[in-house]
Amino acid sequence: MTDGNRIGKKITTLRESLGLSVEELAERAGAEAHLIAGIEQGALVPCLTPLIKITRALGVRLGTLLDDEDQVGPVVTRGGAGEAVTRLKDLETGTATGTLDFFSLAHGKSARHMEPFLIDVNPAADRSLSSHEGEEFIFVLDGAVQVEYGKDLHALGAGDSIYYDSIVPHQVRSAGDARAKILAVVYAPF
């Protein structure tokens, strides 16, 4: 099963357990019904913005959709062993061809409030801006990225970091034609 389909199946299960139709969930989440249906069917690859809205509408934390199992206590993730979560085309919902590859560093940790990821930022054309409740911290491990935040553009290289309120429209992209690697910690209040 693809990652997107795994997430879609979890959304379907949670939605049905609440007795909600696709349309009712879409209304609660402030999303289009075709978007919810596409994610549930695995035809669309989800990203953080709609996933956060969907999890809020379902009354669960973001990690509920991204994890396979819950673990109480600390989670240790060894180098190179981050759990692949999903591939995103952009910060909206796109097809399975991705420009951001997410690897969870807290896979399985129950009741967490932060989502730490290693992300490979692949070169691509400009994408649309995203906004959602919460905060994000990004540390550039390798390469260079550009962070568009509101009307400002921040160029970051290896060793640089940025911390911002994610309610402001933003976008993270590779600076140029080379891939970059970042550590990102996303906090989405529940």
Image (tube, rainbow, N blue to C red):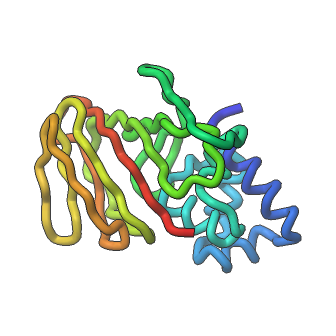
Q: Nearer the viewer, residue 31 or 77?
A: 77
Q: Nearer the viewer, residue 76 or 116?
A: 76
Residue 86, percent across and down?
53, 39
Residue 71, percent across and down?
68, 40
Residue at image point 33% right, 61% down? 128
Residue at image point 57% right, 38% down? 74
Q: Is residue 26 visible?
A: yes
Q: Quadrant of the C terminus?
A: bottom right
Residue 36, percent across and down?
66, 62
Q: Is residue 5 visible?
A: no
Q: Nearer the viewer, residue 105 or 71?
A: 71
**Quadrant of the rendered structure where residue 98 is?**
top left
Specify whether 2 is left or right of 78: right
Residue at image point 29% right, 57% down? 171
Residue at image point 18% right, 31% down? 143
169 up-or-down from 103: above or below: below
